[in-house]
Image: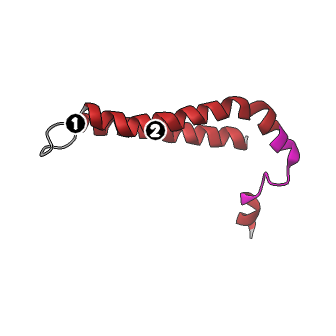
């Protein structure tokens, strides 16, 4: 039953929730919105830019760019979660 307590750690801690809303959500909301926008740019732009003939497909550079974005995004999201939990 301890796992259930971990899932709701911030649910009843109003001081932590107020701190998050007042100090972090101002900039974090903008950063998360920009990250969502960047995701759609990364999904749409590289296949269009690096597309080859219909029979060949998409260049490996587009896959590499998207893989690099995914790795950076994973690092970013883990950092944000650790920052919020702290």
Query: Measured from the top left, where is residue 47 in percent x and y?
Result: 29, 38
Mark number for residue 21? none
Q: Earlier in the sequence, mark 1 or mark 2?
A: 2
| Screen quadrant of the N terminus | bottom right
- Residue 9 colored magenta? yes
Give 65 or 56, whichever is nearer the viewer.
Answer: 56
- Residue 81 colored magenta? no
Question: Can you name the residue that lies furthest to the bottom here?
Answer: 1
Q: Residues within 10 Å of mark 1 (few under 14, many from 20)?
A: some
- Residue at image location 84% in from the left, 40% down from the top: 18
Q: Can you tell which quarter of the image residue 78 is in?
A: top right
Question: Which residue in the protein does label 2 denote?
Answer: 39
Give 24 or 47, whichever is nearer the viewer.
Answer: 47
| Screen quadrant of the C terminus | top right
Give 13 or 46, whichever is nearer the viewer.
Answer: 46
Q: Can you tell which quarter of the image residue 24 is in?
A: top right
Callout 1: helix, strand or loop? Answer: loop
In this rendering, would 60 be left or right of 56?
right
Callout 2: helix, strand or loop? Answer: helix
Magenta-drawn segment: 7-18
- Residue at image location 81% in from the left, 33% down from the top: 22
Q: Can you tell which quarter of the image residue 23 is in?
A: top right
Query: Measured from the top left, where is residue 30 in percent x and y?
Result: 63, 31
Marks 1 and 2, how far apart at CA:
18 Å
In this rendering, would 14 be left or right of 70?
right
- Residue at image location 24% in from the left, 33% down from the top: 50
- Residue at image location 47% in from the left, 33% down from the top: 38
Question: Can you name the residue that lies furthest to the right here?
Answer: 15
Question: Which residue in the protein does label 1 denote?
Answer: 51
Q: Is residue 13 above or below residue 6?
A: above
Query: Measured from the top left, where is residue 44 in percent x and y?
Result: 36, 38
């Amino acid at each position: 039953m301890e796992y259930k307590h971990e899932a709701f750690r911030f649910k009843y801690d109003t001081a932590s929730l107020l701190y998050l809303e007042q100090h972090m959500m101002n900039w974090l909301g903008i950063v998360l919105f920009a990250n969502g926008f960047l995701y759609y740019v990364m999904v749409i732009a590289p296949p269009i830019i690096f597309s080859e003939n219909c029979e060949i497909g998409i260049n490996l550079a587009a896959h590499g760019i998207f893989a690099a974005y995914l790795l950076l995004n994973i690092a970013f999201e883990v950092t944000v979660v650790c920052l919020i939990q702290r």
